[in-house]
Amino acid sequence: MRKLVFLFVLFATFGVVVRAADVTFKASAPEAVVMGETFRLSYTVNAEGKDLRVPEIPDFDVLIGPSTSTSMSTQIVNGKMTTETSLTFTYILQPKKEGTFNIAPATIKVKGANYTSNALAIKVLPPDKADEAAKEGSTGTGISKDDAFLTIDVSKRNVYEQEGILVTFKLYFRKDIASINQPKFPEFDGFLAQEIELPDNKQPVMENYKGKNYNAVVIRQTVLYPQRSGKITIPSGKLDLVLRVPGPPKQRSSVFDDFFGGSSSYIDVKKELTTPSVTIDVKPLPSGKPASFSGAVGNFTMTSSINSNNVKTNEAVTVKVKISGNGNIKLVKNPEVVFPNDFEVYDPKVDVDIKTTAAGSSGTKTIEYMAIPRYAGDFEIPAIAFSYFDTKTNSYKTITSEPYKLHVEQGAGGGTSPVISNFSNKESVKYLGKDIRYLKVNDIHFVPNNELFFGSFMYYMCYLIPAILFIVFFFIYRKQVKENSNLALVRTKKANKMATRRLKNAGKLLKENKKEEFYDEVLRALWGYLSDKLSIPQASLTKDNVEAELTKYGVDEPLIHEFMDILNTCEFARYAPAQASDAMDKLYEQTVDAIGKMENTIKK
């Protein structure tokens, strides 16, 4: 028996480990309370504490407290048992007046060290006002129209095109909710929608709405960017839920029914909640747009840098442009960087980091432009300009970088071409090895020929044919040199080829069901094709000047509208809910067909 007692004491001593975790001291209370009602103010420390010092609370009456309670939690991990003890001090308070009041931090002593809690802010709401209309609207089941409803709140109803607005859907309720069906939110046609991520375990907060206190919870928040001017209507949303309300009392069958609650009953009542439609008045952006403006609306900054001002031929030159700020940053087009004519320019590499909150979409867009100088000399990359419409001052603002001086030295000959990664738009260069064949030495046999070659027909043809070929090749060479010197003509001829290559990449993304990457690649194909075909830099391309240029080239209006519809579909679909694969297939076929029609119409 003594051995068993000894083993038990030994196990209890070494098998249980008291967690020596960091000491935490936390104050907690409701965020909002109603005037005249009581609530709990609790201070919890995860250790043995003493000498609790609570600040003065002049705005609340202390009815009870402090009452002390102790709790213990136990965990067993890998055979080791750990325990943690928590000590809670509780006060029962009652507010003296309405308003928002702060409770300063409290202090407690643990093992000789002082610890401080967090401060609290408590909002005291007015009591409910009598609402006779609500009583009249009550149904026989005890459900009033004010017991649960859905609201839509719009931060602004009069905005500029591309200016962000916050739309909030909030549920108010006063009865217990048994279940909620999936909400049916409206389609935001005419807007680019950026969803705000809400926590999965959203907790209701008490809120006074039109003189009555409700439990309120936000069920959706979205930042919308209007894509056109005029009046745009947000249709009504819908939410179905089931409320649990007291039903008619049951017939008493026992004297104990009242004591055990057997005479009361509850029933579930279905209720459909809808929001009213909201109309947004969208103003067009004012005239006087700078040349470098490409649709950015908000508040932005721009910085730029270059990897080196001194390089050798065939070495890469990289200019990095970083645009940061708050606004429609996802739709901001890349500023134009003009490299010297003798530089081989590649498509820019773009990286976007965006976070959407109730304050709007903010983040950074980083663009890396790369080019390779082929000749030595001194060059200059002109200043980079970026313009945006500032919604705070309602005016256009332009940010300009410094120009970059570039000194290019002749690189070592015979070297291999630089390795390019993450950039495209240039043909791959293939180098073929050149072998030197050995001479074969064999016996030589001469065959006698009695015909005289000198002065014969073949003799003169040997002179005439090379001369004719030389003249033909000379004119062909002159023509190629002339065409190659005209970069716009070269880009125009390669427009269809580059668009086809990008559409092949889009086809691969379509098969892999990568929605956002697919629409991005289709957009690159379309904007790149239009830039090459119309000889307009991509940074300067807008839907307006594209329509104007295509009209000049004699393109039919239905084909122009088809191109514009494809562009709009891609821009909206990138950030809209997931599209069906059939819609993506159809868009891909429309794009291929539209580019084919355009090739047949514009022949340069």
Image (cartoon, helix red, strand yellow):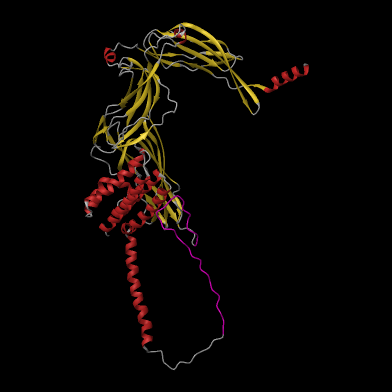
Q: Position of residue 286 (x, y in %)?
A: 24, 37
Look at the picture and state if 466 lies above or below 54.
below
Q: Position of residue 178 (x, y in %)?
A: 40, 22
Q: In this rendering, would 542 be left or right of 5?
A: left
- Please give the name of the residue rendered at 29% of the width and 53% of the height, measured from the top-left corner: 594
- Please give the name of the residue rendered at 35% of the width and 54% of the height, measured from the top-left corner: 499
> As rendered, which of 229 and 76 lies closer to the eye?
76
Q: Position of residue 296 (x, y in %)?
A: 32, 39
Is residue 56 at least partly visible in the picture? no
Residue 196 falls in image quadrant: top left
Look at the picture and state if 77 lies above or below 521.
above
State the count of labels: 0
Q: Position of residue 131 (x, y in %)?
A: 29, 12
Inspect the magenta stretch and tell me whether residue 550 lies in it. no
Is residue 366 at least partly visible in the picture? yes
Q: In this rendering, would 576 be left or right of 278?
A: right
> As rendered, which of 566 and 408 lies closer to the eye?
566
Which residues lie in the magenta part?
Answer: 414-442
Inspect the magenta stretch and tell me whether residue 425 lies in it. yes
